[in-house]
Image (cartoon, grey):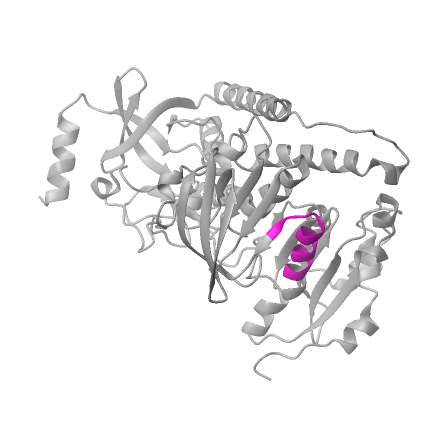
Amino acid sequence: MGIQEAVASAALNKGAEPEELDLVILGDGTGSTLAAWTFAGEGQRVAVVERKYIGGSCPNIACLPSKNIIHSAKVAAYVRGSEEFGIAVKGFSIDMSAVRGRKRRMVSGLNEMYLDNYEKTGAEFILATGRFIAPKTVEATLADGSVRRLRGTNVIVSTGTRAALDPIPGLAEAQPLTHIEALELGEVPEHLLVMGGGYIGLELAQAMRRFGSRVTLIEHNERLVYREDEDVTEGLAGLFRDEGVETFLNAQIKRITGKSNESVQIVIEQNGAEKTLEGSQLLVATGRKPNTEGIGLELAGIEVTERGYIKVNERLQTTAPGVWAIGEVAGSPQFTHISVDDFRVVHDNLSGGGKRVTTGRQVPFCLFTDPEFARVGLSERDARAQGISYRLFKIPMEAVLRARTLGETRGFMKALVESEGERILGFAAFGVGAGETMSVVQIAMIAGLPYTALRDAVLTHPTLAEGMGVLFSSESAAQNQRTRAAKQ
């Protein structure tokens, strides 16, 4: 017996024999929640061990709460610009405690719905701190100190990720906000310093600016969302400039002093010169770290990658027999809808189908700034990097009549179509309703429809989706913008 097996055996022998279940789930993310409800509904004995959030991060501290707050900020922007719509509003104030209250009511309603689904399906939800103590065996320590041990025929790990704090001098001591605390603010920050020009940083920076905060955003890359095409990053940069968000690009943070919610100073180096930025609050949005430490993975034979994510194959099987991992902790793209698809992959494989895999699937996404940015499939940058030639179809949002009726004409839509055929390779939109519009194209891509099917479709007027006809009728312009592959 090896050292790890001996430690696991000793830990297991300290207590009573574990309860035997068909499926034990560690971590209640969206994908694992669906797994619990589905497998229990199919007659299996299922238990979920979750340390804090019913349903995981998405309905409690991430996706849905943030969009709730962002929508309140959009309403504030409407009120501020109400004269454009012929409505005179003489001064108004933001009550962040009321904004927070609206968000909390939504979260509370979601929690009730989730618990009701647990009861209906027969899956057991255990609010406890969980860790592996042996292969396929989880120990759950409840708030009252009592312990339950659960062994599953199969186990799913879905412990997610958390905000990463870079090893910057003074950062930890500054006690910065993460997205969790930012969504719980009861007052509008006087001056919010935002570290990170990715999704979380951009969404919350714009929202807080619209609530009335002065906002300074610091990004170490030369562009916002630097992995995207230049027209996207330029569009976002222009949006933030017009809304008064101060942005420092290609800025390296050297050190931080002070404390968030009091006074914070950040020394940055930009183009060889140092500069000090000062604010009242500091928000860190510079990446995520997997929650794999301290949960006994080594006792269960579960290996992790160099970056700390759980090693999985294309079927999301870990290195331990009978143990699966889904969602962000498995290194999957960090979107709730991907966690949902991860569940489908695992469900198919455990149910005997065994055909679903994670490779080759579409990964659509939407950045919920206002206007939104959404993309599915290849970007121009991706196509050039892979040596794929394409035709570019592109129109400004003002060409979509519905956008004109809304008075929201900022941005564009574009699509990549294969050079010698009619297959759609990718779609991107920076504009009002971009996420919904993208889904129209994505469904066509899933169905394998030629771009002409969207071009010639009878779509309701005036809708944003009607813009598909305009976009895919711009072939003459697209022909003039035919892009050769980088290798050519």
Q: Which quadrant would the N terminus be assigned to in this image? A: top left
* Residue 384 falls within the magenta-colored stretch: no
Q: Is residue 350 visible?
A: no
Q: Nearer the viewer, residue 310 or 35?
A: 310
Task: Tell me which residue sits at (56%, 50%) in the image.
Answer: 217
Indicate the quadrant where residue 430 lies.
Answer: bottom right
Q: Which quadrant would the C terminus be assigned to in this image? A: bottom right
- Residue 347 spot, x, y in % from top left: 46, 40
Q: Is residue 250 left or right of residue 172?
A: right
- Residue 415 spot, x, y in % from top left: 71, 63
Q: Nearer the viewer, residue 325 or 355?
A: 325
Task: Tell me which residue sits at (50%, 38%) in the image.
Answer: 281
Please determine whether, in this image, residue 139 is positioned above or below residue 452. Answer: above
Q: Is residue 156 left or right of residue 436?
A: left
Q: Nearer the viewer, residue 229 or 181?
A: 181
* Residue 240 falls within the magenta-colored stretch: yes
- Residue 66 spot, x, y in % from top left: 58, 36
| Magenta-drawn segment | 233-246
Indicate the quadrant where residue 109 lies.
Answer: top right
- Residue 143 spot, x, y in % from top left: 32, 18
